[in-house]
Amino acid sequence: MKRATTAEQLVPWTADLLNVVLGLEDPEAINAALKAYFDTYIATGARLSGVRVN
């Protein structure tokens, strides 16, 4: 969430963040999924409902 508070716009969709990490247990996978979510949102404004990082 720290990245959300430092972005130009706040991300109000906390449910999206839960959906992005749902089922992930590895901290590195969770960080990668959240990074992909925020990078996409900041660059395009698009909300992702799920990100899978291999």
Image (cartoon, helix red, strand yellow):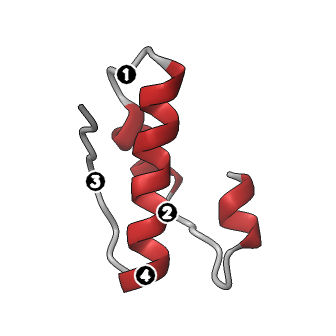
Three-letter residue code for mark 4: Ala
Three-letter residue code for mark 1: Leu
Q: What is the CA distance from the residue labelled 4 to the residue labelled 2?
A: 8 Å
Q: Secondary structure at mark 3?
A: loop
From this view, report whether residue 49 is shown above or below residue 18.
below
Q: Quadrant of residue 36?
A: bottom left
Q: What is the CA distance from the residue labelled 4 to the residue labelled 3?
A: 16 Å
Whichever of labels 1 and 3 marks the residue nearer the N terminus, that label is 1
Q: What is the CA distance from the residue labelled 1 to the residue labelled 2?
A: 17 Å
Q: What is the CA distance from the residue labelled 1 to the residue labelled 3?
A: 14 Å
Which label was assigned to residue 38?
2
Camera-nearest label, 2 or 3: 2
Which label was assigned to residue 24?
1
Quadrant in which the C terminus is drawn? top left
Q: Secondary structure at mark 4?
A: helix
Which label was assigned to residue 49?
3
